[in-house]
Image (cartoon, grey):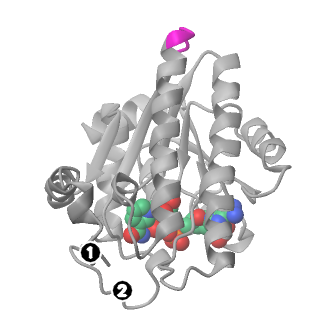
Amino acid sequence: MSYLCKAYNLIIMKKAIIIGASSGLGYEVARLLLEQGWTLGVAARRLEKLEQLRDTAPEKVQTQVIDVTSDDAPAHLQELIDKVGGMDLLFYASGVGNQNMELEPDIELKTVNTNGLGFARMIGAAYRYMAAHGGGHITAISSIAGTKGLGAAPSYSATKAFQGTYLQALEQQANMRGLNIRFTDLRPGFVATPLLGDNPKYPMLLDTKKVAREIVRAINKGKHVHVIDWRWRIATAMWRRIPRWIWRRLKVK
Ligand SMILES: NC(=O)c1ccc[n+]([C@@H]2O[C@H](COP(=O)([O-])OP(=O)(O)OC[C@H]3O[C@@H](n4cnc5c(N)ncnc54)[C@H](OP(=O)(O)O)[C@@H]3O)[C@@H](O)[C@H]2O)c1
């Protein structure tokens, strides 16, 4: 499968844009797509990290500084698409996340700004581009945290629910409009990336490289929604069934 994908992508020079490619899952997925023969445009706020990625395959990678919370971010996305020469695939990995038991307002609002407004701003820009250019594939990492309200991370779980619902709505709208745009909503459990800090201690913690491989497989298969990994598929299927009067009494960290 991966050999066929690589050969196919090499022949037709498929172009992917990755937003949030400077670390963690975005960085690892970028490396895997390069191995499969994709041409990449990579974006985030930290240019030096993007340049490290570009230096691994200078002829295949273009970089662009994009802050998804900024009004000019869609214009910078268009600049990057122009540098790459098109966008067949968007892989959206930008995001912030914190536990916030004290409900610090700065944390709550920054999370809404990045994961909510930034997400709608950038996914919307990609959708409009693809609608005007014959279609494409929009893929984004939401989270299993979006499947229930988590007391330890209110704005994080709420914005992840927003992301999942937003993608579901766009998928329906694209069908209603007869647009050739596909969607993949990727929902990992806890992954040992910089987002969780040093020495993260979380249940069923996942390895970044393994999750990145599962993400690329799900994208290649054109999955609509994919929870990573199988243990988290079981866990989320079970906790979705927990009634609200029980859920509010649980201590979930
Ligand atoms: N780690 C987990 O346990 C886990 C689980 C489920 C879902 N996720 C989701 O997976 C996605 C990737 O996170 P990760 O775990 O790989 O964490 P990460 O290593 O911290 O990566 C986050 C990425 O988002 C970018 N970013 C943050 N704020 C941005 C902004 N304002 N504008 C543009 N880019 C911004 C960062 O780049 P710059 O700082 O350079 O801008 C970085 O590339 C996030 O949406 C996260 O919520 C993570």
Q: What amino acid type is highlighted by mark number 2?
A: Pro
Please say whether residue 10 is visible from this viewpoint.
Answer: yes
> Does residue 25 appear anywhere in the picture?
no
Place residue 189 in its image quadrant: bottom left
> Which residue is labeled 2 in the image?
200
The answer to whether 229 is drawn above or below residue 110 in the figure is: above
Q: Position of residue 45 (x, y in %)?
A: 72, 66
Query: Is 119 within the magenta?
Result: no
Q: Which residue is mark 1?
A: 205
Q: Count residues near mark 1 (Cα–Cα under 10 Å), then give few for <14, some for 14-19, many for 20+.
A: few
The quadrant of the picture showing ligand 1 is bottom right
Where are the magenta residues, as a range? 176-180
Identify residue type, mark 1: Leu
Residue positioned 67% across, 35% down in the render = 124
Does the closest atom of ligand 1 sit within 8 Å of the Cβ of label 2?
A: yes
Q: Position of residue 179 (x, y in %)?
A: 55, 13
Hey, which residue is sitting farthest bottom in the picture?
199
Hey, which quadrant is residue 243 in on the image? Answer: bottom left
